[in-house]
Image: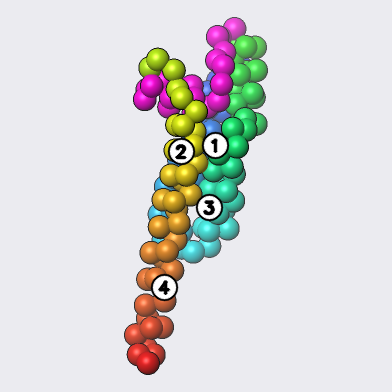
Amino acid sequence: MPYRVAADLVLLAHFLFAASAVFGGICVAMDWRWAWIHVPVVAWSSAVNLMSWTCPLTPVEQRLRARAGQAGYRGGFIEHYVGRAVYPRGMPRRLELIAGVSVLLGNAVVYAIILLRAAQPVLEANPS
């Protein structure tokens, strides 16, 4: 039982990490200091997806599930939890690429909007 709970906690942490990569720009929009956390999260999340790396949380979860007597899974977090919902017959590699590029481009748009909004008072004060 403790291994199953630990595996579920690792899964929750993994999900929250991925969600912060996608939606963390909202925190940055409220307070720019969140960027110190968000930018590295986006960089890591994108790199893992684009380079087909295995996030260290995946094997930790799999080992804990095995110790709990649960069936493990092959592949990565996105492939297992997201890919099955989107591609029930097996996830093509392009979903990882789409995830990596989407996180980068989506956050680039968010940061561009934040920077433009921050620059607006300066631009209005100096209308030259």
Local crowd size for mark 1, using a 10 Å CA cut-off: few (<14), some (14–19), many (≥20): many
Label 4 secondary element: helix
What's under tag 4, amino acid-wise? Ala
What's under tag 2, amino acid-wise? Ala
Q: Which residue is mark 3?
A: 38
Seen at 60% across and 26% down, the residue is 58
Q: Sequence-wise, which precedes: disc 1 or disc 4?
A: 1
Cα distance in 3D space between marks 3 and 4: 18 Å
Cα distance in 3D space between marks 2 and 4: 28 Å
Q: Residue furthest bottom?
A: 128
Cα distance in 3D space between marks 3 and 1: 17 Å
Tag shown at residue 49: 1
Q: Is residue 62 left or right of residue 87?
A: right
Image height check: is 41 above or below 27?
above
Q: Which residue is mark 2?
A: 99
Label 1 secondary element: helix
Q: What are the residue bounds of the magenta stretch?
A: 69-87
Tag shown at residue 118: 4
State if disc 4 and disc 3 touch (CB < 8 Å).
Answer: no
